Image (cartoon, helix red, strand yellow):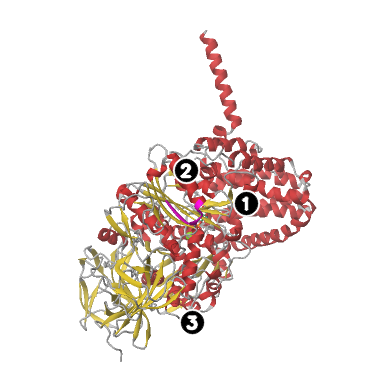
Amino acid sequence: MEVKTAGSVGEIYRISGPLVVAEGLKAKMYDVCKVGEEGLMGEVVGIVGEKVLIQVYEDTSGVRPGEKVVNTGMPLSVELGPGLLKSIYDGVQRPLPVLREMSGDFIARGLEAPALDRKKKWDFKPTVKKGDKVKGGQIIGVVQETDIIEHKILVPPNVPERTVVEVYEGSFTVEDTIAVLDDGTELKLYHKWPVRVPRPYVEKLPPEVPLLTGQRILDIFFPIAKGGTAAIPGGFGTGKTVTQHQLAKWADAHVVVYIGCGERGNEMTEILEEFPELIDPRTGKPLMERAVLVANTSNMPVAAREASVYTGITIAEYYRDMGYDVALQADSTSRWAEAMREMSGRLEEMPGEEGYPAYLASRLAEFYERAGRVKTLAGNVGSVSVVGAVSPPGGDFSEPVTQNTLRIVKVFWALDSKLAARRHFPAINWLTSYSLYAETLQEWFRQRFPEWPEIRRWMMEVLQEEANLQEIVMLVGKDALPDKQRVLLEIARYIREFILLQYAYHEVDTYCPPEKMYDMMKAIKELADIFYKALEMGRTVEEIENVEGRDELLKSKYEVDYKPKLQAALEKIRKNLLGE
Amino acid sequence: MASEGVKEYRTIRDIAGPLIFVEKTEPVSYGELVLITLPDGTVRKGQVLDTSKDIVVVQSFEGTRGMDKSCAVRFTGDIVKLDCSPDMLGRIFNGRGEPIDGGPRIVPEERRPIIGSAINPAARAYPREFIQTGISAIDGMNTLVRGQKLPIFSCSGLPHNDIALQVARQAKVRGTGEEFAVVFAAMGITFEEANYFMKDFERTGALERAVVFLNLANDPAIERLITPRMALTAAEYLAFEYDYHILVILTDMTNYCEALREISAAREEVPGRRGYPGYMYTDLATIYERAGRIRGKKGSITQFPILTMPADDITHPIPDLTGYITEGQLVLSRELHMKGIYPPIDVLPSLSRLMKEGIGPGMTREDHKQWNDQMYAAYAEGVELRGLVAIVGEEALSERDRRYLKFADEFERRWLNQGKYEDRDIEYTLDLGWELLAILPEEELTKIERKYIEKYHPKYRKKKAEEEKKEEAESELTKR
Ligand SMILES: Nc1ncnc2c1ncn2[C@@H]1O[C@H](COP(=O)(O)OP(=O)(O)OP(=O)(O)O)[C@@H](O)[C@H]1O
Ligand SMILES: [Mg+2]
């Protein structure tokens, strides 16, 4: 039997930063408590003898032993219902704009605000009728949440099968009753769900559809599947955040959940200012219409940072359960791991590697395991794709967070500080990165773009060969190489500068649709054929390297109407080298 | 909330390093300000780091030298605060926020907790106003904007102080006439260094618009943990209550981090990398993130922290964690310094992440972005070729390569190098850069659009100037 802990009152015994120890409190693990006279929010993270250890989501300065602690008896939960989209929350789902109205530009302590607007009315259209049987996870109606997302109202997943005795159509707030079940259960437009518990589904499905990102190096070389997991580790300033922002902007997901976990405030501001202005190429609507932001920046309380990734992924799962494809970005999972380490240190747990708790690996695994393409309880297919940034100290990937993450995720986008220093962006190393989905997904590409897999493989080989040759060049110089290999180096250069190089801030090239990628790939292949033929015809390597039309070809991708430019450049090169 | 009848305890159980363990107290709050009276009557300040019904851990800002168990400990019931008022301007304080310039105490309009609160991310405005510092390496290739945090990663013996001072003297947002007020926080720097700053502030009259906090090398190390927070509290007050644009100079953050390590060691915490505490990232973030702009507020806080990289190593935790928080970095190079170049800013590892929003038409100039890409690429190429020359000798180079080498040399000698009092406007910085780009064959300028080349490349400018002259002469002729 479960002990009832709700309403139990205890007393603070000790305070050490975000860790508060209470005594005389009835509690179970992960109960949410209100700590001190100000009622600061915290969560039970340990029970030692008669003492209860609580991590507090707010600054504890000024709190003293003897103040009371009240247990809500509830686990840390999020509110799930219409109004999530276009919102920005802190790590424990408090809406930041509302907090601003309450306490001004700086976040005060002890503030409480419901995650979903209690006054706003939504037009609810039922999809079930009186007498229908419904059960957990099923869709009972819809609300147009934003211009592009129809919010499916779900029966809370843990409700057993029941008969609908009442269902209402009309305009409701999230707290109004919209349906009644035969056991008296009243359903509303929203329900709560504990963040640390994965939401249930029927079964996981194999990932076989790519999550297109509009970033060439990702989609062509290291694609992630819908429902897949990827990590993007890199030292400071190598491009983690820019890549994550690019995914949030251009990934072909229905819904995007962006978690700023222990990173910069201005990076969240950038999204807040930019997304309402940027247009989603697929829906023609502002990107903000599909986004939920969770921001627990580096200067916000560290315990709430620990919670923020769970808050984010629970929201993502919720939209998945409606049958949507959700893309989640977590920047940076290292800051989350550090929050765990800090709490663990204060709890005086046995430290593992580099002071991280021994459960680091399992927490990371549990988190990424919540990604996936699934058959939902409602019978749809939905997915959550997770991309985690990793910030290794000194840019050294041998540290525990990177290593443990790589053991779990299927895609590794390795940022390379040398490439970043050369301003080759995205600074993703094409030799060390990998995607375990790549092979499976080639089938999807082949059906739409027949030569895609083959050209992709060829380009990979060229780049690999380039790396090998470069080692030789370092020793003996370029001139010592046979002509054919020098031409290969030249082709590799085009692959790097034309295909791989993609500036996030270029207004056209920031997003590359797959059709354009395919055109570019074919152009490079054609170019290579021209080069080799030219060589056979007796053209010198210098002629090939300095061929007129090179510049036009490289710049063609910057045009909205790139096709004629690209074709013209290719023709020019062909004419100059082959005289055709 | 200063409580009445504050109690005094003589129940110190242990003293260890900068920490004092006090028992049998009434409830003491976390973070509370503590006054410790020594046997000789002197009073030192401290702060509660851990509190429970059984034992309270206090860190003494001024160290524990001379303390024994008979010291009287008073818990003030208040957390550490700074007396805030616009009268702070023109004043000099010690690292604990007490005036040391002989002037009166500040009569506070408000007493603010120095730990500060986080700016609500939904309240921030993205920084995008170009600050002209008059230093080419910054304005041209690592542009600073109002509300940015841009540190200098220096090495011991390099002129980071001169750069900071030059920025403080020259920084302006063009066309606004708005001046910066400086908040200067010294942590563990030498008397000479501090004096160097103070003399310059006095000489230029900047002192009247400055708030100075001095914790010098011979001042207590632990005090350094509160000095930057004092400074930033003053900065926030002036920026967001009184609309000032504040430039905060924090030097030297390395000394701050050492103090953090000392406390952590004294508390016997599990150390992170190289003995620095695992929470150093978070701790530094609570300093650096106190920069920025707020929607609907006129004032701003721009941060210019200085740190010296131990053993010139950029992967050391102090620069590393700083780089993970700040919006770029200016990296100084010993090699450039040895060549006699000032400022010795190595633009290759340097970066300003907020530059993209602050440059371009209406802010600096239309060609700035592409110009920057080209300058960067050309210099990188030149530097790389130098490495090659060292192996194969200059004879093996092509004409093209030689031009790149020349570019890199002139880049350093003419463009990077400038006077400590030379205040270059952005047009000058860009035009000088164009002169260098003209060293390269024109086909090499692949990153710049034709229209800008024709407008700004000296060759076409000269041509244009000649044509104009000719036209003028002709029209003159026809007129006659
Ligand atoms: N795809 C890209 N296109 C253009 N510029 C880029 C790209 N990726 C990175 N950059 C450049 O690199 C800079 C740093 O990138 P970013 O902020 O993403 O680094 P980060 O890895 O998130 O660093 P940190 O760990 O410090 O947060 C950007 O400000 C931008 O100038
Ligand atoms: Mg980042």
Residue position for label 1: B334
Residue position for label 3: A350
Quarter of the image holding residue B273?
bottom right
| Dot label at residue A255 | none
Q: Residues within 10 Å of mark 3 (few under 14, many from 20)?
A: few
State whether discs 3 and 1 lie on one chain: no
Marks 1 and 2 in Cβ contact (< 8 Å): no
Residue at the extreme bottom: A1
Asked whether mark 3 lies closer than 8 Å to ligand 1, one says: no
Q: Main secondary structure of the magenta part?
A: strand
Q: Amino acid at mark 2?
A: Asp
Q: Residues within 10 Å of mark 1 (few under 14, many from 20)?
A: many
Residue position for label 2: B200
Q: How far apart in space, not on screen, are marks 1 and 2 (Cα)?
A: 25 Å
Q: Please, what secondary structure does the residue beneath circle 3 have? A: loop
Q: Which chain does the numbered disc 1 sit on?
A: B
Residue lying at 25% horizontally and 61% vertically, measured from the top left: A102
State whether discs 1 and 2 lie on one chain: yes
Q: Judge whether B167 appears above or below A29 on screen.
A: above
Q: Nearer the viewer, residue B100 or A291?
A: B100
Q: Which residues are magenta?
A: B184-191
Q: Amino acid at mark 1?
A: Arg
Q: How far apart in space, not on screen, are marks 3 and 1 (Cα)?
A: 43 Å
Lateral position of residue A1 relative to residue A401, left or right: left
Q: Which chain does the numbered disc 2 sit on?
A: B
Q: Which x, y percent locates residue A420?
A: 57, 56
Q: Judge whether B162 appears above or below B2 on screen.
A: above
Q: Which x, y percent locates residue B451?
A: 54, 35
